[in-house]
Image: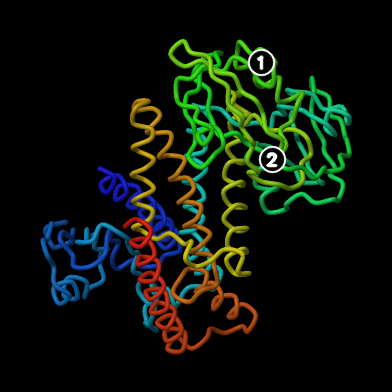
Amino acid sequence: MNIIIAILIFSVLIIIHELGHFLLAKSNGIFVTEFSIGMGPRILSMVKTTKGYRLRAFMSPGDFAAANRELEATIYSIKLLPIGGSCMMLGEDESVEDERAFNKKGVWGRISVVLAGPIFNFVLALVLALVIVGMRGYDPAKVTNVTSQAKEAGLQNGDVITQINGKHINLARELDLYLFFNPLNEADVELTYERGGEKHNVTINPEYVKDYKLGFYYDDGNGTIVKEVMDSYPMKEAGLQKGDIITEINGTVVETKDDIVDYFKQNPMTEKAIEIVYKRDGTVNTASVTPKLAGEGYTIGFGIDGSRVKTNGIGVIKYSLAEVKYVIVYTVDSLKMLFTGKVKANDLAGPVGIVDMIGNIYKDSAPSGFVTIFLSLASFSLLLSANLGIMNLLPIPALDGGRLVFLLIEVFRGRPVDQNKEGIVHMIGFIALMILMVFVMFNDLNRIF
């Protein structure tokens, strides 16, 4: 099932991309020789004849050339491999003496044709965002679990962060992304937050803290039943099990999950052992549990809720644009980390890895029903579509961005670069991309198997 879903998603993304090239080519009077879905041998083609359009199965390159010789109508094809697609234009890679040829059109017309593919991917991402935000709402950066310096600065649970160090925040994920790429240190943090329709500005000095954990989850509801104990964490090592009922912590009686939360808010964990009293099968037991250091770093004293809330029509448009912006910024910042060595090439995911991700998304969302499956896959498709748009704009030969580089050189030079030389550069770029694809696919297979 995950392979079928992946093929459908890839097909839609690529068809939209190539449709952008196709429509702008047509609007600029450029003759499109073939519009195809997939790669490899043609399995079905629609060809214009003297009697109108006819379907042709398994056209050979020779048959294709013969059918295309008169250049009267575009051939529409479906190819064997359900990945990729193409919009082949007359005079795209060679000089052709025909007024309908790509190479005969003005430079700005050609730039619009090349740009159309990535732009259509961004448009698709926006359409998906409108659907997602319209159905699920958006995730404001709502403050929760206010402690220490944030409380002293005046923040309260329910405040919504709108700026951090001058950067506008529309979504909780934007704040998470900012803090991921700009880790907190001893420098002050400037925050703007909204409460009751009014905006407030505060300055918070981050505090260096150590994060200790016991390693267990609560049961559903508000009881003190242990739902799960984590491997390699103190609770399991101390002998506690799923189903145990916690009754006391360091002599303090706890009857609800909120009691446990409140206790640790007032008595933050350290490396000091904690005495836990619990019941198992009616028997009272006591365990000494020493919290485990799970992380350390700077904090500004609050968490973010991140749950989605519904919004009105204008809000749907505003926060859909914010969704697309978030994905674009995330992709660009991730590429920066890749090029600066902060992210390793081994972390890249290719088609095999993406298919595996789609399978996991489907598996995780299936128990919640069709709507959850649809929205989860739509969110991932939004990410893929924006990624495809950005990747194609990179100044890499054989990609749209590589073609744009040569077109911009033409704008500044006043004349085009020799097409043979440009073709050689694109061929080298294509070979390099194929080598990279093999490398990424090998990494995918290594991770999965």
Using residue 208 as the reference point, say whether residue 401 is left or right of it: left
Q: Which mark is residue 346?
A: none
Camera-nearest residue between 122 and 287: 287
Camera-nearest residue between 134 and 188: 188
Residue at left offset 33%, top offset 44% = 359
| Residue 428 position within the rendered picture, expressed as x and y whole percent measured from the top left | 42, 83
> Relative to 362, does residue 93 appear above or below in the rendering?
below
Residue at left offset 69%, top offset 29% = 142
> Relative to 61, does residue 286 appear above or below in the rendering?
above
Q: Amino acid at mark 1?
A: Asp
Determine which quarter of the picture holds residue 56: bottom left
Residue at left offset 38%, top offset 35% = 364
Quote the CA–CA distance across marks 1 and 2: 20 Å
Would you call the spot at circle 1 few (<14 residues within 10 Å), some (14-19), or many (20 or more)?
A: some
| Residue 281 position within the rendered picture, expressed as x and y whole percent measured from the top left | 43, 13
Quarter of the image that includes the N terminus: top left
Determine which quarter of the picture holds residue 277: top right
Residue on which disc 1 sits: 259
Using residue 290 as the reference point, say whether residue 103 is left or right of it: left
Q: Which mark is residue 211?
A: 2
